Amino acid sequence: MKIWDLVQFAYLYLFSALIPWFKPTINNEVQEEYVSEFDYLEYKTSLKFLKMTEITSCFSPISCLSNILLMCESKEFGDQTSELGKQKLSNVSKAVDAHGEKFMLVNCLFTKDNPIIIARKGDGCRNVNYTYSNVQAVFEKYSKWFREITEGKMYSPLKIDHLVRNGRVYLTVALFKDEWAKKFKASCSEKLRFHISSGNYLSNKTFMNQEDEIKYDKIESNKTLYHMVALPYAKKNESDYRSYMVYLIPIKIKGKTFDKTEFGPQLTTVWENFYVDYSKNNLKNAITRLNKRKINLLIPKINKLQSEFDMIKFIDNISKLSNAVRIESTMKTFLDVNEEGAEGKAAMVSFAYDSAGYSDSPDVVANVPHISFIFDMNLETILFITKYIG
């Protein structure tokens, strides 16, 4: 897998407390409620991302979920959540082709002195125990592996000092690559205005143009109307494509058109409408049932979009998790969308310690604040989501 083709990287590290033998647990009475929280983690974190960001940004839900499940499997939050993490990560592993050209997910656990046994083996799971005497060798082996999968084009934020000072390090690496099923022609790209709000716009934004039969519909519910477009990537699963870039482009929000209200701050309404009301929490089905229609699509070209977040703000609404572990976390992301396809990276580093109008071919132009996300049909998961407001 070539670094230049990778669309996403994600890294999450959990560091133990000064009392390494202490493990937080969760009251049995609330275990079932805690388990159910993870079924909605993707929706909750993506919704919070849209609420909190005020500029164009991208975020990686799959890395957040995978790493938390790895913590669960390691009994960071009690025995019952250990089974939850094991089951869900096993299901993901079955869907991921670790040797595939398009997507790979690897979960790593580094433990110092006191090993945590993870029974699952294979390319999608790495479990390493180390001591002070061999920490240098372990770090060098990891660094070599990291250089190999990235062809030396990207540096890992993990330092040897992290392994020396901390008892547990959790790492999730997600790698994705694909080209559009039908590439955009650079010669068809054009400069247009992007409207941030009524009377406020950016000139000369580059929009990629494609007129074709594309999965498309106009969705209307609760006085909110928006375009839904699903652009496939080239990799196929039998008769369907494995992944899609989905665009949600608002026309009206809460009954008001663009000249009557600001779309950017209200994209959460579009997301709630789409994820809950229209998709019924099943994005795969929502994409699958879309019919193709000939449209003239124009979407903005994204050039090296970089974002950084305090991750605790995205997960502190999951009360059982926040009560079990105190976490300091940062996620950094990179995204590039051009005529060939998309290229992006997300790096998440966390420090934690134990504690308590239309023609036959209508124009669909994403020239107002909108949402886009890459969805993997095998994993039934969002790889990353973008809030684009200019």
Image (spheres, rainbow, N blue to C red):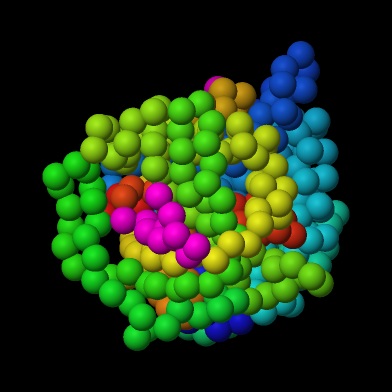
Horizontal placement of 76 versus 390: left or right? right
In the image, 77 versus 380, the foreground residue is 380
Q: Residue at x 25, y 57 (%)?
A: 194
Question: Which quadrant holds the N terminus?
Answer: bottom right
User: Residue placed farthest to the top in the image?
Assistant: 29
Horizontal placement of 56 versus 31: left or right? left
Horizontal placement of 76 versus 322: left or right? right
Horizontal placement of 166 versus 255: left or right? right
Q: Residue at x 74, y 59 (%)?
A: 378
Question: Which quadrant holds the C terminus?
Answer: bottom left
Q: Is residue 14 magenta?
A: no
Image: 209 above or below 222: below
State whether residue 243 appears in this view: yes
Image: 224 above or below 42: above
State whether residue 166 appears in this view: no
Which quarter of the picture shows residue 261?
Answer: top left
In the image, 175 versus 111, the foreground residue is 175
Q: Position of residue 182 (x, y in %)?
A: 56, 78
Which quarter of the picture shows residue 107?
Answer: bottom right
Q: Residue at x 72, y 28 (%)?
A: 36
Q: Residue at x 32, y 36 (%)?
A: 257
Which quarter of the picture shows residue 215?
Answer: bottom right
Magenta range: 353-367
Judged by its main secondary structure, the magenta piece is loop
